Amino acid sequence: MTTATRDLLKQHFDTAFAAPDGIAKLRELILTLAMQGKLVPQDPNDAPASELLKDIEAEKKTAGKGRQDQSAEALAAD
């Protein structure tokens, strides 16, 4: 988050908090900033999200096969 954004948020926090939908809008703002990667400094060496999603999907498939093998062994033992 830039200093200007942080200062602006501090300056208007009480107004946003007191508004009827203030908390909901504040949550929405924080989520939007997070999705845009603006809340923390970004590391240019980090892998893109698309690669991370592929890795997660591959891990799920591997973990799922392990569970299926365990279930089959348990059924065979009965």
Image (tube, helix red, strand yellow):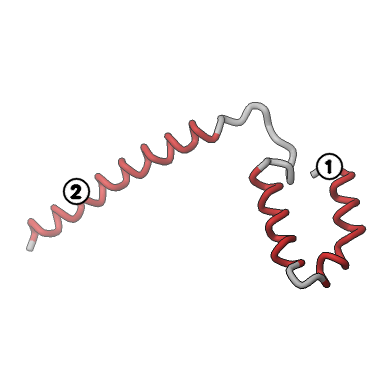
Q: Disc 1 marks which residue?
A: 2
- Kindly report which numbered mark, 1 or 2, lies closer to the viewer in this rendering: 1
Looking at marks 1 and 2 on the same chain, the residue that comes earlier in the sequence is marked by: 1
- In the rendered structure, are the residues bearing label 1 and label 2 in contact, judged by CB atoms less than 8 Å apart? no
Asked if residue 58 lies left or right of residue 21, the reply is left
Classify 3 as above or below 55. Answer: below
Residue 36, position as x, y percentages in the image: 67, 41
Q: Residue shown at 25%/51% (left/top)? A: 67
Judging depth in this view, the residue of 22 and 10 nearest the camera is 22
Asked if residue 45 lies left or right of residue 66, the reply is right
| Residue at the farthest top position | 45
The three-letter code of the residue at mark 1 reads: Thr
The image quadrant that residue 24 belongs to is bottom right
Q: Considering the numbered disc 1 on the image, is that residue within a helix, a strand or a loop?
A: loop
Crowd around label 2: few <14 · some 14–19 · many ≥20 (10 Å): few
* Quarter placement of the C terminus: bottom left
Q: Residue shown at 56%/31% (left/top)? A: 48
Asked if residue 58 lies left or right of residue 31, the reply is left
Q: Which mark is residue 22?
A: none
The three-letter code of the residue at mark 2 reads: Asp
Asked if residue 8 lies left or right of residue 46, the reply is right
The image quadrant that residue 46 belongs to is top right
Q: Disc 2 marks which residue?
A: 69
Classify 57 as above or below 78. Answer: above
Q: Residue shown at 64%/45% (left/top)? A: 35
Residue 49, position as x, y percentages in the image: 54, 35
Q: CA distance from mark 1 to mark 2?
A: 50 Å
* Quarter placement of the N terminus: top right
